[in-house]
Image (tube, helix red, strand yellow):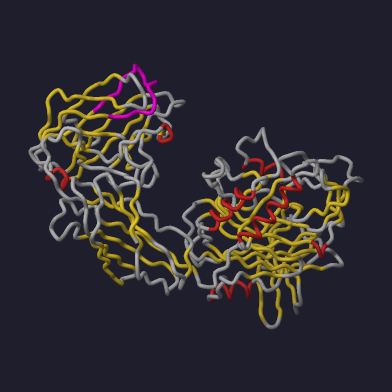
Amino acid sequence: MRKTLLSIASLLLVAGNINATNIGYSKDEISRNNVFRLGSTEKQGQAMRLSHAKLQALKGKTIDFAEFVLGSKNVTDKKMHVFLTKQLDGTPIAEGTVEVKKALSKIKWTLDKPYTITGDEDCLYVGYTTEVATTYKVLMSDGSYDIEGCNYGYKDGAWVDTYGMNKGSALIFVNAENVGDYTDAIIAQSNFEGYYKAGDNCNFSACFVNAGTTDITSFDAIVEVGGNKTTQHFADLSIKPKEGYSFDLKDVDTSSEGEQSLSVTIANVNGAGKETDTSDNSVSANLFLYPKTMERSLLLEAFTGQDCGNCPGGHLNIEAAIKKTEKNVIEVAHHVGYKPDMFTMSEDPTYIFFYPNMSSTFAPAAMVNRNTYANVSTTPIVSATDVNSLLSTIYYADTKEPYVSLYLKTTLDESTRELNVKLYVLPHKTVPHNSSIFNVYLVQDGIEARQANGGDNYIHNRTFRGTVTGNAWGYLVKDIKAGQLLSWEKTITIPESIHSSYYADETKNNVEAVLKNMSVVAYIGEFDQNDNNKHTIYNCCEARLGESHKQTGFVKPTDVNSAEAEQSVSIFVSNGKVHAGGAYDRLQVYNLAGAQVENADLTKGVYIVKVTADGKQTTKKVLVK
């Protein structure tokens, strides 16, 4: 299917003078929204690169001036250093100093001596550097799709390719004289990332730019997935210079789960042998197809308060949004963001971190998978007074990869109120983020209590009752690799009632912890304690107390079976004694020297515990504090 895009680049575009050609990758649209800076140093800069093949097409043509657009005029001494060079860190062919009089408009640099392209150059760079205070953004792009190897930025003392930064092309233009017509296509950043399941009809598309001076009327797309190659032919087109073109990939085999290599090559543009430069016509990526049975859930964390008069309406909006999406959404309600109340727990203020302004919070609000959907908000938090914003955020979160499947097991002794929680995390794919966290929430439904605009008998559901881990953020894990099972276990005693951390008088405002109305919610996701836009919940699941939930995508390879067998007996320490949950035949405790010790009044230290059940032995190290 053909789609004509907004122009995302233009190389050798015919200018007003019939004998002059404007060389550049930018679509020449200036917008303050596309101003940015790179790195932490005051020195900033941008450059555009012309490849060897393109320079061969320009052989004998003369470059006499260049133009640049800056995002700020507040540069040091109102000056910028401009250059034409074969190497970004080498000696320039030509250079100069230009006065910066105005931002967001073209600044012209006329070369003292025009440069004639020989065609033998490996490449040429045209660019600038300047000094600007860190409070100003001076770099400028067109906000289009990225083009690999064509645009560079100066970041922390080095030039870096801005491909993948989602900035688009630098607003840099070079004037060349008497350039003839020719054909050229250049592949643009084609995003094949997404959440795909094996066997599903997956929609993949690629795009390229008409970077020549004539219309593109036909081309072939050679698509290779997992070693299987197909060719799609496109004809009767009229892709103008300055235009981009997007097309869907057909006959992509998605029957096999796991990682699949994908490549797309644009060939035979306007016929075989017609294209000037084919070196930039290909893009490659790795797809990952999750199991057909893959189950993923989205974590919606609501922010509410008993004194919030708009919150009952917000609760209804959240309920309506979840129902309309038909996605598997698990809701947890934090009583923070308005005022502390009888449900506010000690962990709750930590999550104010996700608000746009931590000193100016609001309710009702919500976040989904802790993702920031830029079309709705600058941080993960969105207002729950608008159903459409909630819907958009849920749909956006659902496009992200889940990476892992979860297996949550709980056992409950109602007489002692002891709850044992086991969490198994099976990564299907190596997680690209270095730092991740997992956590387990305690949640309660059916609590009858006061609510502004809801009366004294309002029913509070999905109420956060603290973490099983005892930590607001949970536990940090690194280097989550495909197939490497993670496991965690803890036993807690649930009190008869749970008291808000924000009321000093513990005889009041106690909320009865009704076991049958309680559940645990486990999740794992990306974590960055310094940036609230770098959080993503990969997957989550929920189990009622005493029950278990194994996500359907949690397959059972040998290592998982072994891990489950090892963890079949729950072992924990309480009051200086080792205990084992469930039925077992024998429990033995040894010190690190290998000597068996009596399992009573154990001193502080590490011990080795062996439990035999049904002829199988489980061995585990325990710490007595």
374 and 161: which one is in front? 374
Q: Quadrant of the N terminus?
A: bottom left
Q: Quadrant of the C terminus?
A: bottom right
Q: Is residue 404 above or below residue 18?
A: below
Horizontally, is 486 left or right of 168 in the view? right
Which residue is pictured at 71% across the width and 79% down the height?
613
Horizontally, is 250 left or right of 419 in the view? left
Quarter of the view holding residue 2: bottom left
Horizontally, is 501 left or right of 156 in the view? right
Which residue is pictured at 74% across the width and 48% down the height?
313
Residue 227 point in image, percent of width and height: 31, 71
201 and 582: which one is in front? 201
Residue 603 point in image, percent of width and height: 76, 57
Which residue is pictured at 49% across the width and 52% down the height?
433
Horizontally, is 620 left or right of 76 in the view? right
Quarter of the view holding residue 544: bottom right
253 and 574: which one is in front? 253
Q: Is residue 436 above or below residue 453?
A: below
Q: Is residue 42 above or below residue 276?
A: above
Which residue is pictured at 35% across the width and 38% down the height?
142
Residue 117 point in image, percent of width and height: 11, 37
Residue span colored magenta: 68-82
